[in-house]
Image (spheres, rainbow, N blue to C red):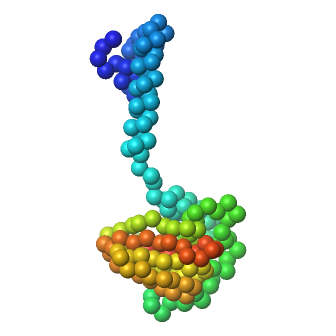
Amino acid sequence: MDSGILEQYVAGIATAQEKKEVEEMAASFPEIRKEITELEIALEAYIQFSAIIPDPTIKPFLMATIDYTERVKKGEIPSFPPIINADSKIEDYSEWIKRSDMNLPADFKDFYAKIIGRAPDTLTAIVWIKEMAPIEVHDKELEKFLILEGACDITIENEVHHLAPGDVLSIPLYKKHFVKITSKEPCKIILQRIAA
């Protein structure tokens, strides 16, 4: 057998003719079948070792964007929630918090988001986090939090900020940060991202 043809077969890049030859040889020679099996196991191990675990917030934010787009298509008038600042209060967002469609779904797992406002330079969402949000660094957007329910620790670099309902925190650019929930219930947050 040509050098490398078994590897190409296992990788799925062998030509139709090469594939036919390999399958005929494997049917006739157990040592070829064994080599193919060993190559498949090695490739699977390599893929598992090299796998990148996706950020668990990507899918919820993608789904929230689709949901928001659909709501606007169906007639929801786009809104522009106030920018979070040191004087922001939970009541400033009651128009959105009290909406019947801004609730946590029954099948909630770890992270859920509902966009309440979007402008070219600002995204505002209600976010629920069950246990944690992974380490992030933003270089093009400022991130701001207003805690609505529950409690969390937000660590910026090595500084831990203990937050409870009504607390506000802004994340500076270029700073590593992550969120760890400290309450038994999920932490409900107004999250805002503003282009820098």
Where 196 sits versus 27, above or below?
A: below
Quadrant where the image shows the C terminus: bottom left
Quadrant where the image shows the N terminus: top left
Q: Position of residue 157 (x, y in %)?
A: 35, 75
Relative to 76, 145 lies left or right = left
Where 121 sits versus 87, above or below?
A: above
Dividing the picture into quarters, in which one does residue 25 lie? top left
How many numbered tags mark residues here? 0
| Point 32% across, 69% down: residue | 139
Could you say which is closer to the camera, residue 115 or residue 170? 170
The reply to whether residue 189 is in sight is no
| Point 41% across, 39% down: residue | 47
Could you say which is closer to the camera, residue 128 or residue 115? 128
**Residue occupying the far top of the picture:** 28
**Residue occupying the far bottom of the picture:** 87
Relative to 103, 189 lies left or right = left
| Point 48% across, 85% down: residue | 168
Q: Position of residue 174 (x, y in %)?
A: 31, 72
The reply to whether residue 183 is in sight is yes
Could you say which is closer to the camera, residue 120 or residue 127? 127
Could you say which is closer to the camera, residue 175 or residue 184? 184
**Residue occupying the far left of the picture:** 3
Q: Position of residue 44 (x, y in %)?
A: 44, 35
Q: Position of residue 51 (x, y in %)?
A: 41, 46
Dividing the picture into quarters, in which one does residue 129 lie? bottom right
Where 19 sits versus 66, above or below?
A: above
| Point 54% across, 61% down: residue | 60
